[in-house]
Image (tube, helix red, strand yellow):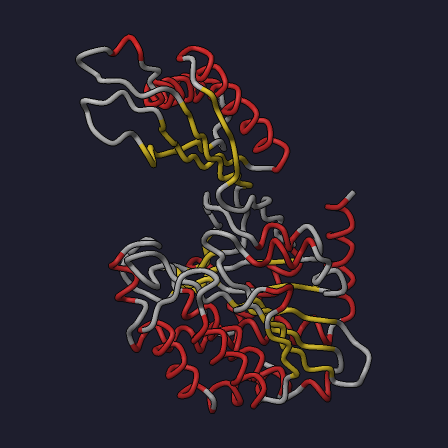
């Protein structure tokens, strides 16, 4: 390990007690997307103490921020992405309390050497990844267009290389019919719940003709008020996912056609809307991902322990990856094979071993960013790959 990385690691290690305090606080005080007032304020304040200039309320989003340290010397712009929203009822079961503190720790380490490496360090505070991810708004506004890389690390039960994610649309279908007494005069009613059931049956049939990367799953979010009344209103919500934006759009069109057919069959009216943001697929920059993996290997993680990603979820980082080179590797923080979005993972991710792993993840993020700041050939490969992916 070279002198710069040694200084980075030493600085993060010296700062580790504070990182653990922050992770513990955020983990114990879960806040839903766009409501992360405590987490956002704490992170922004901490970055200011480290010498970063912080812009709060970015794009009018109350809990979004961008923190920047410009060295004053020419060089790449490296973006570290922080997430801090929790899940309803089960809190930080996706480990976002560790994601944001890994970004903070990496920023602290890079700040210690930035005047020597040159370039600019940014930390993007990105609310609501689970629902209406701020990265979508930030990417659309061009806030990543001048970044040379964007990187974050996600906690998990194993080390995984950055892979891909599925593009997603969140579709809401509302049917309106006519209420009637279900026993006395059902012939006078138009059953909106029947339309929802027809929609589910049609989607179930559609699944036979979809590619293996398709994911279509939904719930009945409103099915009526009482069994003795013909429901005059019913609502269903679906996630429609595909390996690319183009295929997700194709699937969404087919599901909407199923919904229209159900409306015609039952005599209901239909309205369709998006109840959460659409995310694009993640396109990992392999040169950047390889640099992160090389740092894991250099710091004692056996190659056999670093797996290929099998992520079939959806990330708002996908939208960022279409605007600048990006990577989303996974850091092992728990020893048992607990899956994300479970109570078991939540509890294990708020223990001392998980916090130690978080500190290690911060070092790996900072080391990778340091490589980009100091290795012109690496940066060239990253940019060439990104340009090819855009073409």
Q: Quadrant of residue 106?
A: bottom right
The image shows residue 321 at horizontal and vertical percentages of 65, 53
The image shows residue 61 at horizontal and vertical percentages of 57, 64
- Residue sitting at x 78%, y 70%: 376
Would residue 199 appear left or right of 260 to someone viewing this image? left
Would residue 33 appear left or right of 318 to someone viewing this image? left
- Residue sitting at x 38%, y 81%: 20
- Residue sitting at x 39%, y 76%: 23
Extreme residue toward the right, this view: 74
- Residue sitting at x 30%, y 30%: 223
Residue 233 visible to an observer of this rendering: yes
Residue 61, compared with residue 366, is above or below; it is above
Quadrant of the image containing the C terminus: top right
Q: How many marks?
A: 0
Q: Quadrant of residue 304?
A: bottom left
Given residues 335 and 39, the one toward you in this image is 39
């Amino acid at each position: 390990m070279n002198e710069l990385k040694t200084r980075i690691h030493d600085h993060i290690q010296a700062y580790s007690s504070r990182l653990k305090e922050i992770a513990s606080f955020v983990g114990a005080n879960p806040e839903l997307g766009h409501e992360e007032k405590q987490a956002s304020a704490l992170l922004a304040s901490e970055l200011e103490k480290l010498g970063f200039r912080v812009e709060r309320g970015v794009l009018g989003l109350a809990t979004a921020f961008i923190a920047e340290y410009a060295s004053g010397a020419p060089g790449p712009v490296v973006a570290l992405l922080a997430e801090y929203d929790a899940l309803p009822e089960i809190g930080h079961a996706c480990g976002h309390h560790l994601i944001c503190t890994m970004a903070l720790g990496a920023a602290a380490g890079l700040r210690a050497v930035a005047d020597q490496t040159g370039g600019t360090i940014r930390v993007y505070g990105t609310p609501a990844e689970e629902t209406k991810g701020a990265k979508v708004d930030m990417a659309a506004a061009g806030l990543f267009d001048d970044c040379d890389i964007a990187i974050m690390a996600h906690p998990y039960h194993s080390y995984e290389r950055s892979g891909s994610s599925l593009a997603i649309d969140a579709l809401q279908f509302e049917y309106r019919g006519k209420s009637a007494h279900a026993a006395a005069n059902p012939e006078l009613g138009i059953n909106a719940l029947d339309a929802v059931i027809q929609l589910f049956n049609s989607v179930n049939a559609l699944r036979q003709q979809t590619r293996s990367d398709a994911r279509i799953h939904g719930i009945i979010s409103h099915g009526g008020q009482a069994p003795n009344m013909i429901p005059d209103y019913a609502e269903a919500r679906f996630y429609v996912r595909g390996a690319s934006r183009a295929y997700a759009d194709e699937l969404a069109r087919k599901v909407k056609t199923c919904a229209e057919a159900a409306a015609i069959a039952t005599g209901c009216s239909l309205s369709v809307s998006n109840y959460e943001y659409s995310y694009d697929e993640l396109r990992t920059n392999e040169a950047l991902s390889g640099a992160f993996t090389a740092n894991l290997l250099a710091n004692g993680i056996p190659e056999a322990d670093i797996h290929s990603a099998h992520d079939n979820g959806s990330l708002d980082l996908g939208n960022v990856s279409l605007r600048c080179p990006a990577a989303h590797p996974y850091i092992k923080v728990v020893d048992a094979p607990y899956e994300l979005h479970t109570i078991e993972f939540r509890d294990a991710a708020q223990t001392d071993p998980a916090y130690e792993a978080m500190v290690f993840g911060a070092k790996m993020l900072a080391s990778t960013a340091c490589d980009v700041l100091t290795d012109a050939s690496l940066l060239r490969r990253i940019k060439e790959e990104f340009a090819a992916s855009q073409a």
